[in-house]
Amino acid sequence: MRGFVRTVKRISEGYQGLLFASLLAQVVMIFFNVLCVFLLQVLVDSLEGLDSLLNVSFVEEWAIFLITGGKGAAFLFENRLYVMPLAIAGAGAALAVSTMLRMMIRSYFSSGVNGAMQLSLFTHLERLPYPYYKANKAGDLIQTCTRDLDVLRRFLVMDLGNFNYTFWMLFFCLAILFALSYKLALVSISLLPAMFVYSFFLIKKVRERYRKSDDSEAVLTDKINENLLSVRVVKAYNAERREIASFDDLLSSYRGKFLSWSRLRGFFFASSDIFVFGSKLLSLLYSAYLLHLGEISAGTLVVAFLFIDMIVWPVRGTATSLSNMGQYLASADRVAKILDAEVEDVEAGLCPSIKGDILFEDVHFGYPDGNEEVISGVSFHLEEGKSLAIMGATGSGKSTLAYLLTRLYEPTSGQIYVDGIPISNISKKCLRSAVVPVLQDPFLFSKSIAENIKIAHEEASDEALLESIRVSSLEETLNRLEKGIDTQVGEKGTSLSGGQKQRVAIARALIAKPAVLILDDSLSAVDTATDLAIRKNLAKWEKSTTIIVTHRVMSAKDCDDIIVLENGRIAEEGSHEELLARPGLYQKIALIQGKMQ
């Protein structure tokens, strides 16, 4: 429960003052609501005669004192026909004002806290390290950011107010009831503890069933997300029927778990009516009995019955909310799982002016979810302004070196130096602004080509934009487009070919003027002539140390140095001519690709 409270406080930070004000206004509203009803007893007793007003409880004495301004029961009896209506009207007006005030504050709180919760969680997600996203499914994260946050918002906006309403309604009504007749008060609330005990035992079962339903819905969300990302593959292989059948199976599983949870909630909601109507019947019968004995007045009977009605329905609602606590706790657990994940500190460390001299010294690395090393004892030196090609079979660790150089992952052992400084001592923010990778399958936003390029450097001049376009050999493509550089690329760049997207991504990296440019198989989708043109432009550009991760000998041959990885180790190193002259993997790849050409 402490974890639940802590999670709610964290996601509603900044709006707790409004929440408190809303709850306080609700207390004032409840007070005047109870007062309006209580004044009915004073009115009924005043109509019975002066003796009824003289033989009242101390609570009613105080009410008479306040209503008459201290003039007493006799004054009230003589002027009851205008004093009591004015008193009830005044209490009613105060109730209307406090209700309106409470609704206004609640509206401000509801509209504000919803955005605050989403911003808080999204901000935390943005600050989490890259390995976190590899270990967690996108569908689960989307589910938490939408459904689970909505559940917690409903708790803050509605159920917390219900709890507050029930508590203070019980407090005021029971305080008056006990003052009027403690016997009637005890009998009237005798079934309420049983209702709370009944709901308490359901909370655990409801929580378990809701968690299963929620997890199943997250699987559905993940399936939808996966299909949207892979729609080309689904269409290409006529796999629509298979995917629909798979989704239907997941939907059936979710439906069964949702119905199991929903049936349990419905059963509790219906069965709790026994306690509600039982309490009302007991209070009515016993108050009639006390009236017959002369222990209470007719006004007390009327007010007691109204108070019981005012109590049992909120209590029933609160008991229902308590049965929903399983749902709230499950959602809070999922949100807390994200909020408790340690954020990435991108600011800590040095921020030198990086020039691009890179040294790997006996670097070892294995992924957290794997049992084997992916990189084993890799050592090489790349001087500032030089170019390096990294080749090797799939899974040999080529891209992992890029991950390590940008500190998306940290080496298990060994050290990486940039300009003679261990990168563990350089802030990630500083390092990543100087070491920029271009991936094989780059992501483009639903913006224009110009906006996609300038994301890396929004203040870049038009000259810098045109230069990055020229170096990435994107000019010819833009000339063929009707709107040129202002062409909207569509979601994830779907209006562009794979090679065009890669060139836009290269231009985006170049406009940031990186000290180290990493082309991680990012020329794989362009033709040989364009590949050559881009590499020639990069050689003349002379602004970056360049690392090219590639499968093509043609892409690697002009680099100053080439390393060939095999099972995470450097199997060969040298220039194109040196590696071609001696037997090894590079020579085999060159011969095979030469024959293919």
Image (cartoon, helix red, strand yellow):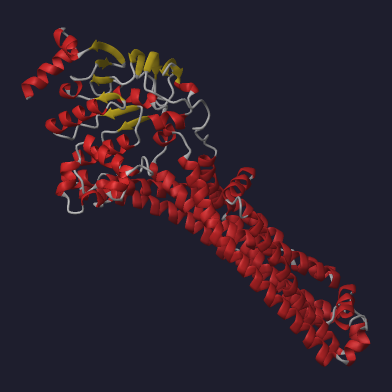
Answer above or below: position of 279 versus 219.
Answer: below
Furthest residue in direction top, as rendered? 582
Q: Position of residue 521 (x, y in %)?
A: 24, 29
Q: Position of residue 365 (x, y in %)?
A: 39, 19
Q: Can you tell which quarter of the image residue 281 is in?
A: bottom right
Answer above or below: position of 212 versus 283.
Answer: above
**Quadrant of the rendering where the C terminus is positioned:** top left
> Which of these two is toward me, 166 or 294?
166
Q: In this view of the protein, can residue 237 be seen by the observer?
A: no
Q: In this view of the protein, can residue 482 be seen by the observer?
A: yes
**Quadrant of the rendering where the N terminus is positioned:** top right
> Which of these two is toward me, 23 or 591?
591
**Left or right: where 238 falls relative to 415:** left
Q: Position of residue 25 (x, y in %)?
A: 69, 66
Q: Can you tell which quarter of the image residue 570 is in?
A: top left
Identify which residue is drawn at 16% across, 21% down.
553
> Which of these two is toward me, 508 or 39?
508
Answer above or below: position of 332 versus 375.
Answer: below
Q: Position of residue 585 (x, y in %)?
A: 19, 13
Question: How many numbered markers are drawn?
Answer: 0
**Left or right: where 58 falls relative to 267:** right
